[in-house]
Image (cartoon, rainbow, N blue to C red):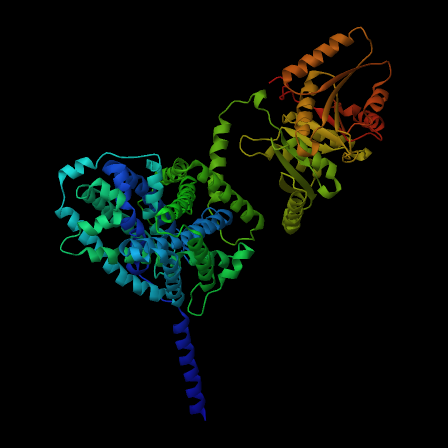
Amino acid sequence: MKSLLKDRISSKKVGIKQEQEETTPPKFSTFTGVFTPSILSILGVILFMRANFVLGYSGLWGALIILGLAKTITITTGLSISAIATNIDVKGGGAYYLISRTLGPEFGATIGLTLFLAQTLAIPFYVIGFSESLIRIFPVLQPYFLHISIITLVALFILTFKGTDWAIKAQYVIMTLLGLSIFVFLLGALLKFNPEILQSNKAPRYDQTYSFWTLFAIYFPAATGFLAGVNMSGDLKNPSRSIPIGTMSSIIVAGLIYIAQFVLCAGAIEREQLINTPFHSLIAVSPFYTGFLVVIGVFSATLSSAIGSFLGAPRVLQSLGKDRLLKPANFFSKLSKSGEPRRALVLSFIISLVIVISADNNGSGVALNTVASMVTMLFLWAYGIINLAAFVETFSRNPSFRPRFKYFHWLPALTGAIASLAVSFLIDALAAFIAVIFIGLLFTYVRKNIMEASFGDARRGFYYTQVRNNLLTLSSLPLHPKNWRPTIVVLSGNPSRRLTLVKCADWLGSGRGIVILVNLILGDLNKVAIARKDHLDTLNQFIQLHRIKAFAEVLVTNDFDNGLIHFFQSISIGPIKPNLAIFGWSSAPQRVKPFFDSIRIAKQLHMSTVLIRDGGLPEKTAGRKPRIDIWWRGRRNGSLMVILAYLLSINPEWSGSQIRILRAIRSNSNADETRFELESLIENARIKAFVKIIVSQQNFSSILKEYSSDASIIFLGFDIPEPSESFSFQSSFDEMLKDMPTTMLISSTGDADLLS
């Protein structure tokens, strides 16, 4: 009985092991998984169907420049990909995975969707190229161009649906045939090489239809296939080693073949043949009746490139879905039992089918050129962002960026990024602009809908480096009133109870300064460390809830007043120190002395002071613009009041507000002079405001209530009272501001000059 039970358990283990072996997808080497799909995608339809066409119009020199520019972009991108791939633990998703772990989930998802579309568009591009080459050989098939394209697309879909290993095995045969094909037409061109033909083919022959950049757009897909190997990252035995070696070697080998084709064909084939019969010219130049190998080669090239795109595009989308960044992409995260992204594969097939059906299906070549331009534009932007990712990692000097790939520098990455984006506009400014809008909308959508990502990226390192460098530069620059910006520290306490105080600080910051909300809690740090974190979390949640642009700080202290003094002395970000302290108004008699002691400390530390007496947040009334009243009593406090009122007025919540500067005088004799001085001051300060001169014998409290009781907010200047006058100052202002709108009492250090 025990023996029988043992046999059953053993058989179950064998069954489980066999099932695991059946469901575990195969892992590929550098040659099989990277070099083979990459070289077959690069040496695709353009090699046979359009390279000689480009050579005929651009001439040898123009063709080599086009090739050089294309290879500059692809080599720099290859170097960037190699550096990133040797710096992280690479998993499935290819270029998408690398970018998302470098520039973050927003850029990652955006570039992932862009690459998926680019490689999916490449499928019908290669299929149309195959169909066009077929009818060039058998013109009788031209009426069946669409049928041939659809049948080819379906056949390739079935092949890739069966599994990656089937497709890879098929590519071995294809690569052998492709290699023979290239060899025979290059050998034939070498045997028929004529220096006179070469001389006649050196200069370009552009026309209104085909310019340098038009030809570049047609040719560039020849350089885009190297990502086919990168996108196999999840199926590689050692992706960090295979991607750099396989990618760079495929780019270099393909580049040498294209150079040989341009030089040898330029010296062996007449220009008219290059332009009018680019494909047949390769057949004609082949020696010893080997032209049939060229035919087999073009079939092999187009079909292998289509297979490479069929393999790569779904893996990008599947990896994006696996990261669960976007809900619509989550559906495509599921793999088949054999480890294939079949759901994403079906979507690629459907999109490709739509493109094939909607293309100009007569075999004239227009469809191939059109789709080539679309593929070029998307790949250029994708390559630009890939290079940008590598540049960000390097330039930010992120300590975690330590790629094992040593042949990398930030300058080629930056060059590749700039070249990719610049070339897209030079090819077709309108199409590039549309691409910018498309990618921008895609980025906005992704950023709005993205879920929480669990992986880190290089952006923090990049921003950290920029902030550090800027702070060091800023510390060496002299202070000047012209450069005054509010760096505000707000004693917010529990901000939910002091919403007016916090909102006023946010309005004064107005995107032009820095706001720091601080909450001081009493206790021993050793005992209340957890409570401190809770207070800090609450403060940050408040900031996010009310969309306030501010930083949060929580200070634990045994004594409130001493703690505040220490905080005022220590708070800074290098050369950026608070220059404006905002306090809430305190009416408690026992707090009068320490309250004004804190204000004096702030002044000694060269901080202007704003005391906010809360009269409630201004209410929006239909048909009535918000009004800001500034009571002018002199330029020292007045300059800061006007600047702060201006910063308040440019906040979106104060859109359309009116600034009114009021001056109360006793005698009418100098009213005109006072008005002129204030209007001149406002004119020179370049601020839109209205001046109102009030001639009255009443006390200021009565004048204030008469003219500003209906204001949205009031600005008043004040001088910090002496310790012996603190109680009388508090009681007089309590009485004067009773039942008045929210009032800001300003005491300036004089650093902010209105006329700067």
Residue drawn at x 71%, y 10% as measured from the top left: 676
Tell me if residue 96 comes above or below residue 623 in the rendering.
Answer: below
Residue 744 x, y percent position in the rendering: 74, 28
What residue is rendered at 33% in x and 36% in y?
211
Q: Nearer the viewer, residue 212 or 716?
A: 212
Which quarter of the figure has residue 661? top right
Quadrant hosting residue 617? top right
Q: Quadrant of the N terminus?
A: bottom left
Q: Is residue 157 visible?
A: yes
Q: Residue 389 location in percent, x, y? A: 42, 44
Which one is nearer the viewer's eye here, 303 or 112?
303
**Figure label count:** 0
Q: Considering depth in this image, is 153 or 336 the residue closer to the camera?
A: 153
Q: Residue furthest bottom?
A: 1
Q: Is residue 607 above or below residue 53?
A: above
Identify the image quadrant of the C terminus.
top right
Q: Is 297 positioned to the left or the right of 555 in the image? A: left
Residue lying at the far top of the rendered structure: 669
Residue 427, horizontal then vertical, whole percent = 39, 38
